[in-house]
Image (cartoon, rainbow, N blue to C red):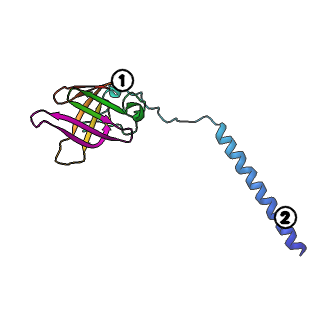
């Protein structure tokens, strides 16, 4: 039993001595002057930043990580309301629904369309997607929070 205890103690001392030697070699390697350093990356030229498609066969760059417009999220509650002009009324709901009513003088009737609305990625256009798929989508330029302009026809709708 004494021999086993002595062998175990000797083995522990031997291993402890090996660890100290490895630690001192690592410290010496850390303080040594490096022989060769990795080359630093050249700065990106300003014209490459202005044209992110340079050097690629890409035709467009789309940033899906940034919010629309000037970096501020579009406030649907503040934008919701009724816009109109003589013979046309567009009700925008904060939940993404809309109702467009146009007076058709030839039929002496009001034509109503409803569906969903979204703001295009650039934050400058409103897209109306009607429930009736036989009806065309409509686009309005967001001139201001109180004014829309129909992309086709240029009709102005002001907040009521």
Left or right, 1 with respect to 74, comes to right
* Residue 104 at x, y percent in the picture: 14, 35
* Residue 61 at x, y percent in the picture: 30, 36
Reply above or below: 135 against 9: above
Q: Residue furthest left?
A: 106
**What quarter of the picture does the N terminus occupy?**
bottom right
| 85 or 1, nearer to the observer | 85
Please tell me which residue is depicted at 17% across the width and 44% down the height of the picture.
135
Reply above or below: 95 against 150: below
| 20 or 72, nearer to the observer | 72
Q: Residue tagged by mark 1?
A: 46
Please tell me which residue is depicted at 73% across the width and 50% down the height of the picture.
21
In whole angstroms, how far apart are the C-alphas of marks 1 and 2? 67 Å
Reply above or below: 69 against 29: above
Left or right, 65 with respect to 152, comes to right
Using a 10 Å C-alpha cutoff, classify the residue at mark 1 as few (fewer than 14 neighbours), some (14 to 19) or many (20 or more). Answer: few
Q: Residue tagged by mark 2?
A: 9
Q: Which corner quadrant of the image does residue 52 belong to? A: top left
Please tell me which residue is depicted at 12% across the width and 32% down the height of the picture.
105
Magenta portion: prevailing SS class: strand
Asked if residue 6 is among those painted magenta in the image, a careful observer would answer no
Reply above or below: 125 against 3: above
Using a 10 Å C-alpha cutoff, classify the residue at mark 2 as few (fewer than 14 neighbours), some (14 to 19) or many (20 or more). Answer: few
| Magenta residues (range) | 91-118
* Residue 35 at x, y percent in the picture: 55, 36
Q: Which corner quadrant of the image does residue 159 belong to? A: top left
Q: Which corner quadrant of the image does residue 96 belong to? A: top left
Asked if residue 92 is among those painted magenta in the image, a careful observer would answer yes
Which of the two discs, 1 and 2, labels the residue nearer the N terminus?
2
| 30 or 59, nearer to the observer | 59
| 121 or 80, nearer to the observer | 80
């Amino acid at each position: 039993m004494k021999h086993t205890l002595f062998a175990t103690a000797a083995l522990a001392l031997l291993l402890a001595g090996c660890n100290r030697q490895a630690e001192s070699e690592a410290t010496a390697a850390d303080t040594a002057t490096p022989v060769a350093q990795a080359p630093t990356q050249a700065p990106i030229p300003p014209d490459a930043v202005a044209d992110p498609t340079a050097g690629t066969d890409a035709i467009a760059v789309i940033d899906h990580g940034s919010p629309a417009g000037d970096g501020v999220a579009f406030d649907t509650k503040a934008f919701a309301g009724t816009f109109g002009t003589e013979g046309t009324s567009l009700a925008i709901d904060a939940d993404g629904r809309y109702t467009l009513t146009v007076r058709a003088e030839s039929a002496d009737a009001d034509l109503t369309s409803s569906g969903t609305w979204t703001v295009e990625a650039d934050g400058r256009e409103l897209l109306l997607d009607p429930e009736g798929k036989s009806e065309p989508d409509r686009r309005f330029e967001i001139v201001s929070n109180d004014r829309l302009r129909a992309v086709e026809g240029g009709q102005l709708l002001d907040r009521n």
